[in-house]
Image (cartoon, grey):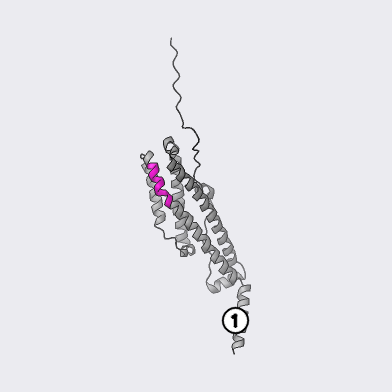
Amino acid sequence: MRMPIFGLIAVAGVLLSGCGYNSLQTQDEQIKSAWSEVINQYQRRSDLIPNLVATVKGYAAQEQQVLLGVTQARSKVGSIQATPELVNDPAAFAKFQAAQGELSSALSRLLVVTENYPQLKSDQNFRDLQAQLEGTENRITVARNRYIQAVQNYNVTVRSFPGNLTAMMFGYKTKPNFTVENEAAISKPPSVDFAAPAPTTAPPTPTPAH
């Protein structure tokens, strides 16, 4: 009796492999890995914000509305539990993406404001934080793109025959993905030229005497 059982197991393994089961497993793990990297990079950005806000506040305390916007956007992001299960919940994923987008926009507004404060731009701590933020934003973009590609590959397998049959059998469903509209605009802070001279006001032209 044992030989037929082993034979059935072997046949089942071959059938599952041919129906995309192994591909679904592999691609699901790739999504988990890509998602972890997205979260790591977003967390890196979040960790930079308190020092950035404090540094800007030291030179531009009057920009309360912009500073408060960044702080509130960061708090909103922190209130969302970015668990592995979030990638299976379209509504929760959309909420997460919207919160991160709001934080990106708030940071962009803050960096635009800093252009009006030459002393802040020349502050070494601010320059270091700016460089770290720009590097982190680049890493976020790379991590998001990898995640987008991983989800696209997985969703194609889930929707395509015969993988769709295997997906239905084992409860695999398509996963929500990042939207790419305005991706470049929200993922890259405005460039700050630290070498640019501070704007000066030309002296008034003297009025010739009569």
List the residue tagged with mark 1. 9
In this view, the residue in front, 101 or 138, is 138
Residue positioned most to the top: 210
In the picture, measured across the screen, residue 91 lies left or right of residue 159, that is left
Query: Magenta span has 52?
Result: yes
In the drawing, does residue 161 fall left or right of residue 89? right
In the rendered image, residue 142 lying in the magenta stretch gets the answer: no
Residue pictured at 49% horizontal, 62% vertical? 87
Q: Position of residue 175 (x, y in %)?
A: 52, 63
Q: How many marks?
A: 1
Residue at (54% x, 73% y) in the render: 170
Identify which amino acid the numbered label 1 is placed on.
Answer: Ile
Q: Is residue 43 visible?
A: yes
The N terminus appears in which quarter of the rendering?
bottom right
Q: Position of residue 132 (x, y in %)?
A: 48, 47
Please give the name of the residue rendered at 57% of the width and 59% of the height, measured from the top-left corner.
Answer: 149
Residue 203 shown left or right of residue 163 in the figure? left
Residues rendered magenta in the picture: 47-57
Which picture quadrant has residue 155? bottom right
* 79 or 142, nearer to the observer: 142
